[in-house]
Image (spheres, coloured by chain):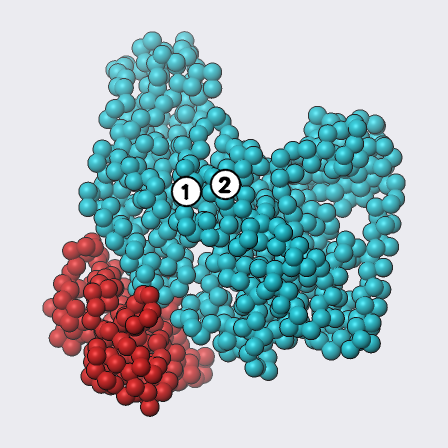
């Protein structure tokens, strides 16, 4: 055994020394380095164009610099994000935000060629210095605690050596020297709970699987992320796939599995590509495959592309899908740890759970327990979207309050609007109102509040959001994504949706609220799998916390948030409307806006389709287009019999 | 043999069978639709066979619960009946109730369930089902009427258990899910007898013989 350990350590040491040498060469040289965030969020914001512009301009000006594609930093509001490390300038590495092609050209010309770092476009310096404020001074940076995303945005996800150079696969080396039981013990002692949403203790799951007496066992990484507005798993796989792979290998070692499946949805082509490459590289270095690092342990991972069904995030449906059948859940027990993929004991863990394993093995269970709360140790990653100033990915220690996450870290609600609700846990979670802002974020507190941790999607909504419509939106999603197997989920959610649809159209009936509550409770209780059991949550919580909004829709035909199209009308405030301005006329797709006798504007309610374009284009100085609910309350503006010419 | 109590009757059952089978074998009726005798892996999809078991917090489906010694099962409690009625009402709300024109009239299992659970065939809680008129005639031996199908999956599951490969499969998602014939690979004949077994298994008139 001891000799074996020596061999493993030597093999790993050789890999790490080579990687560290490459990294030293890269970071130690005086050639400027341009790090560009090239994950999907960056690419959507134009990172590829930015990269092309950098390359073209460097060539044109004949400047030597290295372009280093990195993953995502989590600061999605600032994409495309570029960090320029220009040692010769004497400045620390500087992070620039929203670097479009023009800024890229300017940076090359002024910073790399000239000597002006263009500080007006910067976000901050990556290190503390006397000259430039560091990003770590901002709450969006310093309130985070990065365990899972520690290396995200620092390394090139397509190069295993960069992961190795920053300490990657050290945990695997340690795990291979440990007895499998010791690994399970460490994970159990760390108190890690599954980050996929339900919060089941990971150590216990592994222990169940390890106890199974079977010739073959399987580890599955569940990256079938499908919640609207959630993209944590994608970002991790695109920024640092090796940390997940390392977690899978350690898990396989702990439970005695020989086969691994990375279940990535096909809608994440970049993640699929990077994971596939990462697996190839790991295989080349013998971190995967036969006799890993010279030990007696063999394990390999294949990539399986899920073809776009939300329900396949459910363990048993995922297994069916990998087996080649229609992804439909089945009754549990037997649980996958006993009877999983092709009948073999199978551990299915979320991407974030597996990415947490390596840090736990490396730093120990005590260290992990020191982060977060007692019952929910560690960190949580949220993808915060919606009405916040700084949307993106945030990794915080568990136990932080919703208020500090939304207001301190993410900058609060933009456009001087009020906070109204936050939807946590995607379509299976719940909407919490402002009175829950001081709730600590951990598995138990959120469940007690009626929401759930979920996989980490968080949608923040301002006071212009209609909660009935939000519930309708999520129900529409789950109803369409139901696999159609069991009665309650297939038909029950459709009836729930029909009722909500009617209410948002102003056709609600007084008995609808009682029926919603009754049916939501029945679907929750009667459904077969987790999707159906949690699908009514948005209805249940919004009915609980925003009941008056439902009542306003049904009893008064009013949408208090002025959002439901059938219950509002647009009008033009003649006191504010500027004489002779035609902005709204030009944008109206149905020509519903006419000019009044004194050359102001009015809206022909018969023609208006309530698209809201006029409100968007009316310049903020006038702000003359208003909304009112119910539609009958808008001021009537007489339409002249003979059309008034606009520009005479 | 295992000894258990269903509605206070002492029952003896073979080890490993489900509560549902044990009850039915002892002539205690538990409503069910998707379950077929001797099925290895019940789909538990109709959500009708709920029972309460002493010591468990919520009703469970009888088809997926394996009998245990001294188990105390109750099939006729308020919570159980409420769930069963809701499930049946949901099924009926997605079914074209047009018994007068249906070949399954009077031998339809939905009618029997409705009678047993005292549920009206057109439940007032839900809007009436709007028939789609979709009839799939692509199968050489039988026709499939979507408006009558309640997606119990018997034709799919029982066939898979017996033949290894089902003659039907589910298609579509959510409330748009349908059953559709799954034709064998080119060159292989479609088994007529096996196809017609599916007609006999259908609890409603959704699958009918051609002609």
Residue behind mark 1: A432
Chain colored red = B
Residue at figure coordinates x 45%, y 28% from the top left: A417
> Which tag, 2 or 1, sits closer to the chain's start?
2
Marks 2 & 1, CB-CB < 8 Å contact: yes
Image x and y of residue A245, in percent: 66, 62
The quarter of the image holding the N terminus of chain B is bottom left
Q: Identify the subunit bearing mark 2.
A: A
Left or right, A290 with respect to B45, comes to right
Image x and y of residue A73, in percent: 65, 44
Image x and y of residue B121, in percent: 15, 64
Residues indicated by labels 2 and 1 sit on the same polypeptide chain: yes
With respect to residue A501, does A351 lie above or below?
Answer: below
With respect to residue A91, does A177 lie above or below?
Answer: below
Q: Identify the subunit bearing mark 1.
A: A
Left or right, A95 with respect to A113, comes to left
Asked if residue A381 can be seen in this view, the reply is no
Neighbour tally class for label 2: few under 14, some 14-19, many 20 plus, Cα within 10 Å: some
Residue at figure coordinates x 85%, y 32% from the top left: A89
* SS assignment at label 2: helix
Of the chain colours in the picture, the one used for chain A is cyan
* Quadrant position of residue A74: top right
* Quadrant position of residue B210: bottom left
Residue behind mark 2: A402
The quarter of the image holding the C terminus of chain B is bottom left
Q: Label for residue A605?
A: none
User: In front here: A374 or B86?
Assistant: A374
Image x and y of residue A625, in percent: 38, 21
């Amino acid at each position: 055994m001891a000799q074996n350990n020596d061999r493993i350590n030597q093999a790993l040491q050789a890999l790490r020394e080579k990687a560290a040498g490459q990294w030293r060469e890269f970071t130690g040289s005086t050639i400027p380095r341009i790090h560009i965030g090239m994950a999907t969020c960056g690419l959507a914001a134009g990172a590829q164009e930015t990269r092309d512009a950098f390359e073209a301009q460097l060539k044109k000006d004949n400047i030597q610099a290295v372009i280093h594609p990195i993953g995502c930093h989590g600061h999605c509001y600032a994409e495309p994000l570029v960090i320029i490390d220009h040692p010769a300038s004497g400045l620390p590495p500087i992070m620039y935000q929203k670097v479009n092609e023009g800024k890229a050209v300017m940076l090359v010309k002024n910073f790399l060629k000239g000597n002006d770092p263009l500080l007006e476009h910067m976000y901050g310096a990556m290190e503390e210095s006397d000259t430039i404020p560091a990003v770590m001074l901002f709450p969006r940076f310093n309130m985070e605690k990065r365990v899972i995303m520690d290396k995200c945005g620092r390394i090139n996800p397509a190069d295993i050596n960069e992961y190795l150079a920053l300490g990657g696969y050290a945990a695997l080396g340690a795990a291979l020297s440990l007895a499998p039981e010791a690994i399970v013990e460490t994970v159990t002692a760390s108190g890690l709970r599954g980050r996929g949403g339900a919060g089941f203790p990971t150590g216990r799951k592994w222990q169940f699987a390890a106890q199974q007496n079977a010739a073959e066992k399987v580890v599955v990484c569940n990256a079938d992320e499908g919640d609207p507005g959630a993209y944590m798993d994608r970002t991790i796989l695109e920024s640092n796939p090796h940390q997940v792979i390392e977690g899978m290998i350690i898990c396989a070692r702990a439970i005695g599995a020989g086969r691994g499946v990375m279940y990535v949805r096909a809608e994440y082509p970049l993640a699929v590509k990077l994971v596939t490459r990462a697996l190839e590289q790991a295989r080349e270095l013998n971190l995967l495959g036969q006799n890993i690092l010279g030990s007696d342990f063999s394990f390999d991972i294949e990539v399986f592309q899920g073809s776009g069904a939300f329900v396949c995030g459910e363990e048993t449906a995922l297994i069916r899908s990998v087996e080649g059948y229609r992804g439909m859940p089945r009754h549990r027990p037997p649980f996958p740890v006993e009877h999983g993929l092709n009948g073999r004991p199978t551990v299915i863990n979320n991407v974030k759970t597996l990415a947490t394993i390596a840090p736990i093995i490396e730093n120990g269970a005590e260290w992990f327990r020191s982060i977060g709360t007692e019952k929910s140790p560690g960190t949580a990653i949220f993808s915060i979207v919606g009405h916040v100033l700084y949307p993106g990915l945030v990794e915080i220690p568990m136990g932080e309050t919703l208020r500090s996450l939304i207001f301190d870290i993410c900058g609060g609600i933009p456009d001087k609007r009020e906070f109204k609700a936050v939807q946590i846990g995607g379509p299976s979670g719940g909407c919490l109102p402002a009175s829950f802002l001081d709730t600590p974020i951990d598995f138990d507190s959120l469940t007690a509040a009626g929401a759930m941790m979920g996989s980490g999607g968080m949608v923040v909504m301002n006071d212009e959001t209609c909660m009935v419509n939000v519930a309708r939106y999520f129900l529409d999603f789950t109803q369409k994504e139901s696999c159609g197997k069991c009665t309650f989920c297939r038909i029950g959610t459709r009836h729930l949706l029909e009722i909500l649809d009617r209410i948002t159209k102003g056709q609600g009936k007084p008995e609808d609220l009682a029926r919603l509550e009754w049916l939501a409770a029945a679907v929750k209780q009667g459904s077969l799998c987790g999707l159906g059991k949690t699908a009514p949550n948005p209805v249940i919580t919004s009915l609980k916390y925003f009941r008056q909004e439902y009542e306003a829709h049904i009893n008064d035909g009013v949408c208090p948030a002025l959002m439901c199209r059938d219950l509002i009308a647009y009008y033009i405030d003649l006191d504010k409307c500027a004489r002779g301005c035609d902005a709204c006329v030009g944008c109206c797709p149905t020509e519903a806006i006419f000019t009044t006798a004194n050359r102001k504007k009015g809206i022909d309610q018969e023609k208006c389709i309530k698209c809201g374009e006029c409100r968007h284009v009316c310049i903020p100085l006038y702000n003359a287009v208003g909304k009112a609910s119910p539609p009958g309350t808008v001021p009537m503006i007489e339409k002249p019999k003979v059309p008034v010419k606009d520009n005479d | 043999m295992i000894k258990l109590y269903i509605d206070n009757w002492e029952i003896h059952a073979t080890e490993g069978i489900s509560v549902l089978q044990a009850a039915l074998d002892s002539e205690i009726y538990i409503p069910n639709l998707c379950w077929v005798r001797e099925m290895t892996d019940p789909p538990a999809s109709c959500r009708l066979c709920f029972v309460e078991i002493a010591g468990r917090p919520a009703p469970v489906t009888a088809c997926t619960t394996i009998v245990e010694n001294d188990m105390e099962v109750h099939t006729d409690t308020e919570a159980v009946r409420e769930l069963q009625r809701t499930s049946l009402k949901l099924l009926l709300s997605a079914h074209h109730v047009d018994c007068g024109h249906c070949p399954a009239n009077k031998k339809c299992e939905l009618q029997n369930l409705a009678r047993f659970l005292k549920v009206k065939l057109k439940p007032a809680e839900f809007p009436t089902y709007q028939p789609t008129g979709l009839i799939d005639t692509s199968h050489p031996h039988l026709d499939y009427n979507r408006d009558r199908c309640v997606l119990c999956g018997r034709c799919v599951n029982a066939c898979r258990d017996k033949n290894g490969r089902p003659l039907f499969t589910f298609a579509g998602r959510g409330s748009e899910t349908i059953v559709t014939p799954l034709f064998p690979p080119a060159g292989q004949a479609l088994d007529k007898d096996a196809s017609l077994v599916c007609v006999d298994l259908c609890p409603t008139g959704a699958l009918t013989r051609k002609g």
